[in-house]
Image (cartoon, helix red, strand yellow):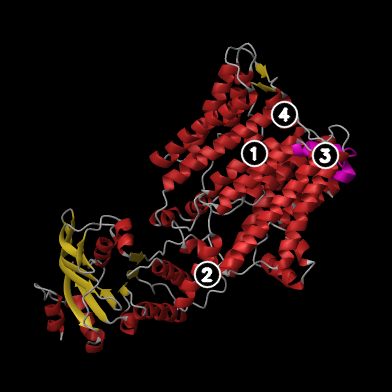
């Protein structure tokens, strides 16, 4: 149940489900699987297994409240992973995001600190934090793009530097408590029942409008339109996902209602997907990742694209860092450490973003973050220690990448 | 061949890289609607000449006339503005993008908010493919990685043609292609000429050249050693020029062609 709701929400429209409606679609789905074009199918199947497994294994897993928990728990990682997608699309890597996120959280914490002399409104503090991290991204990206230092090295240095800054600043206080309500809302605000339904209706309505507008545009240009079956399936899928999620969250007693973090996840998912798929910038990111030389010859300003991508990844790290800090109402010395960095990269890769550039979607980060959060939540509720969580997450990562590699080989073979 | 004024005319082009004299007083011309082959052994200066036209290199001396007017080409953008497009041997396609996306690479149709106009691009791509009679590509929405070598070449050529270009330069378009695919690409090259474009084809394959070209310019050791009309020459004669041609020209192409007859 949980799985269906979350996954169908992506406009990928899982091949298997569409196929049941229409034999033509079924044939195409089989064709896709044969040629290694798996799409989100493996992750959907994987999620079903995970949810069923923990549903039996852990008594408190399959509850409405826990569903809501998972949404909040995945939010921080998802934000970082969204940024990682763009970096990976270029064929680069950004190892600094976890501590850049830490810098974002630290900035916010400092700027909201009562009695510090530089306290500002929480909303402004968040904007300032994102701006600070954007500048970090600009600096790191410029070194990669203009000087030509490998991104691995630049961001590894960033990893150390920003960790050092956090340690240095927080050495005295040890941690800063975040009291500002706006900042804490990012992880702990829950919409009322009615507001939740309204949001679900809004999401569904806007999606339907976008699809219709796209259809008319294609009609006018006399271009082939996707079959009605797929369109209806997608619309129904989004509606079910939106209303289903809200229904479950509203059903939960504590915390009751749709978490703001969930809405943020969707807003950034939609906005960044739009950026990647519907704008010239996004197209150029894919082009540079696919063949930088071809992109350059086609007149694309490759260094500019690289710099902007690193700005995006640092900015998204700031957003994720703020949500993670809000989740625990504080920033401490260990912030940004642990598995945050690797989980964020793993999320993008599990979702199907290639490490070699040019292949992948923003929604991959969403799906990957969902898988990672669900697994670690499930193992936690089932009473396992963090060692087991790392091992299982590692195995899932390995499986996902192995599957992706095999799929790619199939694709190449069927292409020739 | 109607005797129209050449679309592109190079006069006395000289280019050296340090002490290496790559081109010496080369004359070259191509008319609209004509397929001009450019042949020569390795190191004869074919690529350098092309790069001078495409703006990758600029000539040390000599002049370039385009449409009868003298032009200075300082970069690929200058060339593109004149309507000169080059299809390089490595095609410069992004494998991960589909046909439409590759056709519009770097020149995407977009609105004021940088939003892509997919329907427009898809429609124009379909039109271009149809006008070039490229029928072997099943879907213009499939990634270029899934296309065969000939199909990829077709995409690269179609991309060059789509931008109202007047002169298309093809670098070894049939290298590494199978027989059937070579046939496809040669047909495509002929069609470009029939549509009124000026086409320059660099090739090592004389068979292909005699299949498509109207005239053949032979370079040897950085000099123009002759211009031959396809109908009035033989492969043996061209081979002789490639391997042992003597620079015949001092004062223009007409003399060179005349000498060849």
- Residues tagged by mark 2 and mark 4 found on one chain of the structure: no
Q: Are marks 1 and 2 in contact (CB under 8 Å)?
A: no
| Same subunit, tags 3 and 2 | no
Residue A267 coordinates in the image, percent (x, y): 67, 42
User: Where does label 4 land, which residue?
Assistant: A185
- The Cα–Cα distance between marks 2 and 4, rounded to whole angstroms, is 51 Å
Q: Which residues are magenta?
A: A54-72
The quadrant in which residue A123 appears is top right
Of mark 4 and mark 3, the one earlier in the sequence is 4
Q: Answer whether residue A390 is visible to the viewer in this image.
A: no
Could you give the CA–CA distance between mark 4 and mark 1, rounded to whole angstroms? Answer: 16 Å
Q: CA distance from mark 3 to mark 2?
A: 52 Å
Q: Earlier in the sequence, mark 4 or mark 1?
A: 1
Instruction: For marks 4 and 3, give the CA distance.
Output: 18 Å
Q: Position of residue A127 (x, y in %)?
A: 58, 29
Task: Name the residue: 50% across, 49% down.
Answer: A281
Q: Chain of mark 2?
A: B
Q: Chain of mark 3?
A: A
Per the image, label 3 sits on a secondary structure element best described as helix
Q: Residues within 10 Å of mark 2 (few under 14, many from 20)?
A: many
Q: Chain of mark 4?
A: A
- Residue mark closest to the camera, 1 vs 3: 3
User: Along the horizontal axis of the image, is A53 left or right of A391?
Assistant: right
Q: Residue A194, which numbered label?
A: 3
In whole angstroms, how far apart are the C-alphas of marks 1 and 3? Answer: 27 Å
Left/right placement of residue A392 relative to residue A61 reads left
Which chain is disc 1 placed on?
Answer: A
Query: Do marks 4 and 1 share a subunit?
Result: yes
């Amino acid at each position: 149940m949980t799985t269906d709701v979350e996954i169908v929400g992506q406009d990928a429209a899982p091949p298997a489900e569409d196929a049941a409606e229409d034999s033509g679609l079924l044939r195409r789905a089989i064709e896709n699987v044969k040629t290694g074009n798996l799409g989100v199918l493996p992750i959907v199947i994987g999620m079903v297994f995970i949810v069923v497994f923990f549903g039996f294994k852990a008594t408190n897993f399959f509850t409405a409240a826990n569903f809501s928990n998972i949404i909040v728990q995945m939010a921080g990682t998802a934000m970082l992973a969204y940024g990682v997608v763009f970096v990976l699309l270029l064929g680069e890597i950004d190892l600094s995001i976890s501590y850049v996120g830490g810098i974002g959280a630290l900035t916010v914490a400092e700027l909201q600190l009562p009695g510090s002399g530089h306290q500002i409104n929480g909303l402004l503090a968040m904007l300032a934090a994102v701006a600070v991290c954007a500048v970090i991204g600009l600096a790191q990206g410029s070194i990669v793009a203009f000087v030509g230092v490998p991104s691995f090295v630049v961001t590894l240095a960033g990893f150390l530097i920003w960790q050092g800054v956090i340690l240095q600043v927080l050495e005295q206080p040890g941690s800063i408590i975040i009291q500002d309500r706006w900042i804490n809302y990012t992880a702990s605000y829950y919409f009322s029942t009615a507001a939740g339904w309204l949001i679900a209706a809004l999401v569904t309505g806007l999606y339907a409008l976008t699809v219709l507008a796209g259809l008319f545009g294609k009609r006018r240009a006399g271009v082939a339109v996707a079959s009605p079956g797929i369109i209806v399936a997608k619309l129904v899928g989004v509606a079910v996902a939106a209303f289903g999620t809200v229904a479950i969250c509203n059903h939960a007693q504590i915390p009751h209602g749709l978490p703001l973090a969930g809405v943020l996840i969707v807003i950034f998912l939609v906005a960044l997907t739009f950026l990647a798929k519907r704008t010239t910038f996004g197209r150029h990111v894919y082009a540079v990742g696919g063949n930088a030389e071809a992109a350059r010859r086609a007149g694309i300003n490759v260094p500019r694209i690289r710099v902007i991508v690193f700005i995006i990844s640092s900015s998204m790290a700031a957003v994720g860092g703020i949500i993670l800090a809000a989740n625990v109402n504080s920033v401490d010395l260990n912030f940004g450490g642990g598995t945050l960095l690797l989980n964020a990269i793993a999320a993008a890769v599990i979702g199907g973003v290639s490490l070699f550039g040019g292949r992948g979607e923003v929604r991959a980060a969403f799906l990957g973050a969902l898988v990672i959060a669900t697994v670690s939540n499930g193992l936690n509720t089932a009473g396992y220690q963090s060692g087991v969580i790392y091992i299982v997450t590692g195995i899932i990562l390995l499986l996902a990448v192995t599957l992706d590699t095999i799929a790619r080989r199939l694709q190449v073979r069927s292409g020739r | 061949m109607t005797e129209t004024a050449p679309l592109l005319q190079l006069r006395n082009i000289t280019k050296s890289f340090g002490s290496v004299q790559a081109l010496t007083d080369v004359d070259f011309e191509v008319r609209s609607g004509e397929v001009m082959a450019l042949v020569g052994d390795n190191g004869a200066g074919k690529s350098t000449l092309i790069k001078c036209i495409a703006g990758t290199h600029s000539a040390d001396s000599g002049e370039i006339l385009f449409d009868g007017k003298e032009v200075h080409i300082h970069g690929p953008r200058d060339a593109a503005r004149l309507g000169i497009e080059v299809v390089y041997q490595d095609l410069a396609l992004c494998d991960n993008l589909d046909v439409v996306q590759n056709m519009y690479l770097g020149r995407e149709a977009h609105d004021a908010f940088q939003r892509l106009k997919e329907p427009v691009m898809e429609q124009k791509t379909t039109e271009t493919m149809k006008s070039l009679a490229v029928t072997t590509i099943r879907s213009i929405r499939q990634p270029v990685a899934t296309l065969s070598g000939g199909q990829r070449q077709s995409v690269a050529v179609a991309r060059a043609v789509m931008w109202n270009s007047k002169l298309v330069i093809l670098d070894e378009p049939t290298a590494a292609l199978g027989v059937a695919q070579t046939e496809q690409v040669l047909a495509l090259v002929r069609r470009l000429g029939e549509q009124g474009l000026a086409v320059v084809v660099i090739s090592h394959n004389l068979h292909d050249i005699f299949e498509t070209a109207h005239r053949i310019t032979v370079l040897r050791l950085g000099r123009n050693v002759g211009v031959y009309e396809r109908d009035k020459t033989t492969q043996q004669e061209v081979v002789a020029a490639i391997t042992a041609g003597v620079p015949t020209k001092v004062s223009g192409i007409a003399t060179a062609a005349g000498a060849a007859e």
